[in-house]
């Protein structure tokens, strides 16, 4: 079983994708953006290998206007073939399973022909991208069925009619997912019977759109598994948690470990890959991997603590001390209590006193290196922060730039600047 995340890697230097507006989509600009984004992808693949993440969703936005030849008419597959080859070789060598997930406007069952044509263009783009990486048919493209348009049966029929006409290369990668409003897992399983498309089960979507079904997640996952063939690779599921204070269906900021472990114990016998859909991305993926590992190492928790410690300190010195005490026994592996405490800290509201306390600890890593002007600027920021917590983000940005300038790796890879 692999546990992975989608699109964005948190806490990794210079890994932001770039794009542009149509008006700025010149040939030269597109070349620069595509090269940058592919290099970012390569860094993410390297990172995932280093931390043991073997499941990763690639952002659909990696090639700006990749499915719109009227805007992007570059022969980017040829121009960047060496880079695709290098990245693809690493993906295969590291054993990382990649996927892609077109957005909400890629709708195959729309009654508007132009919308359907653009959706097919988008699926061709995603298929081409994965083909260029040289990854097999186990690397999937996930798609929702689409809209209901006041007649679900007719909308399903349209989806099937369009699906049947798709190029086989697309069909080999396409899998369909239940959603939180229109198509339940039962609907998608029925569509699978008529198309042969494998089904990916989404637990939060099912919780919001189940028509009163009360079977456990494992029941539906086992039904979805039957839609997968050997060539499709290990069946996969999408796992997310409801943000406790947020609109219905919004993903949580981080995976709550106790809730995840309940899900994990239910579905572990199903032998599926789990794609986390969560706002802190890889951070929760690492958390869930460490919580379920069969090779527990205290050193892994200590590495995690080094990343989280100043984020915890700025929210709760008491929790900070509790975690330090928890990790003193080097013969133990208290992974669940460890993450419970971190979650408790992240749920705390920031206050000026604890924020400044943590800030001063972080400043201590650079205060012997900085110029007098930088010291003066820091003191100005701190004075402002003493009056208003809103200045915390500004002083953090300043300190992060200093960490990069003076190459303070301990700070650069701290989550203090991320969370």
Image (cartoon, rainbow, N blue to C red):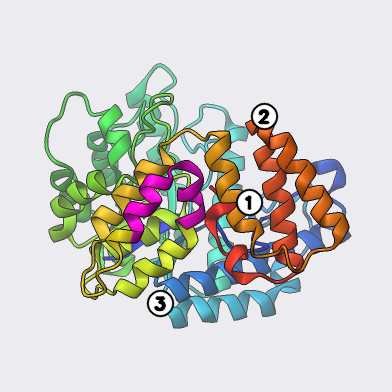
Residue occupying image coordinates x 24% and y 42%? 189
In the rendered image, residue 313 lying in the magenta stretch gets the answer: yes
User: Considering depth in this image, is 24 or 358 the residue closer to the camera?
Assistant: 358
Q: Residues within 10 Å of mark 1 (few under 14, many from 20)?
A: some
**Which residue shows up at 69% across the image and 57% down it?**
400
- Residue carrying label 2: 388
Q: Is residue 101 left or right of residue 381?
A: left
Element under disc 2: loop
Q: Is residue 264 above or below residue 286?
A: above
Which quadrant, please, contains the N terminus? bottom left
Asked if residue 104 is among those painted magenta in the image, a careful observer would answer no
Image spot of residue 133 (x, y percent): 55, 72
Disc sitting over residue 61 in the figure: 1
Q: What residue is shown with label 3? A: 95
Q: Give the Cα distance between marks 3 and 1.
A: 23 Å
Question: Between disc 3 and disc 2, whose residue precedes?
Answer: 3
Q: Nearer the viewer, mark 1 or mark 2?
A: 2
Rendered view: 210 above or below 140: above
| Side (left or right) of 313 relative to 236 | right
* Front position in the image: 383 or 153: 383
Q: Is residue 326 visible?
A: yes
Q: Give the CA separation, mark 3 to mark 2.
A: 48 Å
Q: Which stretch did the figure color magenta?
A: 309-324
- Helix, strand or loop status at disc 3: loop
Q: Based on the displayed image, in which of its 4 quarters is residue 55 positioned?
A: bottom left
């Amino acid at each position: 079983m692999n546990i992975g995340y989608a699109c964005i890697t948190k806490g990794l230097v210079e890994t932001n994708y770039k794009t542009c507006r149509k008006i700025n989509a010149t040939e030269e600009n597109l070349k620069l953006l595509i090269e940058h984004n592919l290099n970012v992808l390569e860094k993410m693949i390297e990172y995932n290998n280093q931390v043991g993440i073997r499941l990763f969703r690639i952002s659909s936005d990696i090639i700006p206007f990749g499915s719109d030849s009227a805007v992007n008419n570059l022969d980017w597959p040829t121009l960047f073939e060496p880079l695709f080859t290098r990245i693809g070789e690493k993906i295969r060598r590291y054993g990382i399973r990649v996927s892609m997930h077109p957005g909400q406007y890629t709708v195959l069952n729309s009654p508007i022909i132009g919308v359907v044509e653009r959706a097919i263009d988008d699926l061709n783009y995603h298929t081409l991208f994965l083909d260029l990486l040289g990854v097999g048919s186990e690397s999937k493209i996930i798609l929702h069925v689409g809209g209901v348009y006041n007649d679900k049966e007719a909308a399903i029929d349209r989806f099937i009619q369009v699906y049947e006409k798709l190029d086989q290369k697309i069909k080999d990668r396409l899998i369909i997912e239940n959603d939180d409003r229109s198509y339940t897992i039962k609907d998608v399983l029925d569509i699978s019977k008529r198309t042969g498309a494998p089904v990916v089960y989404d637990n939060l979507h099912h919780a919001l759109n189940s028509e009163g079904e009360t079977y456990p997640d494992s029941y539906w996952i086992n039904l979805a598994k039957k839609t997968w063939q050997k060539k499709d690779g290990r069946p996969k599921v999408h796992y997310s948690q409801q943000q406790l204070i947020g609109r219905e269906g919004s993903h949580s900021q981080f995976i709550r470990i106790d809730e995840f472990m309940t899900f994990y114990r239910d579905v572990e016998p199903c032998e599926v890959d789990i794609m986390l859909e969560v706002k802190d991305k890889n951070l929760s993926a690492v958390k869930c991997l460490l919580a379920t590992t069969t090779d527990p190492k205290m050193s892994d928790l200590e590495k995690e603590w080094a990343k989280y410690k100043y984020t915890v300190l700025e929210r709760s010195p008491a929790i900070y001390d509790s975690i330090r005490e928890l990790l003193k026994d080097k013969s133990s592996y208290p992974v669940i209590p460890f993450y419970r405490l971190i979650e408790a800290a992240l749920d705390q509201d920031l206050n000026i006193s604890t924020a400044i306390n943590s800030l001063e600890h972080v400043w201590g890593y650079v205060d012997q290196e900085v110029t007098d002007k930088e010291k003066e600027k820091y003191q100005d920021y701190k004075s402002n922060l003493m009056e208003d917590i809103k200045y915390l983000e500004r002083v953090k940005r300043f300190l992060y730039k200093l960490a990069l300038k003076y190459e303070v790796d301990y700070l650069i890879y701290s989550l203090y600047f991320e969370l």
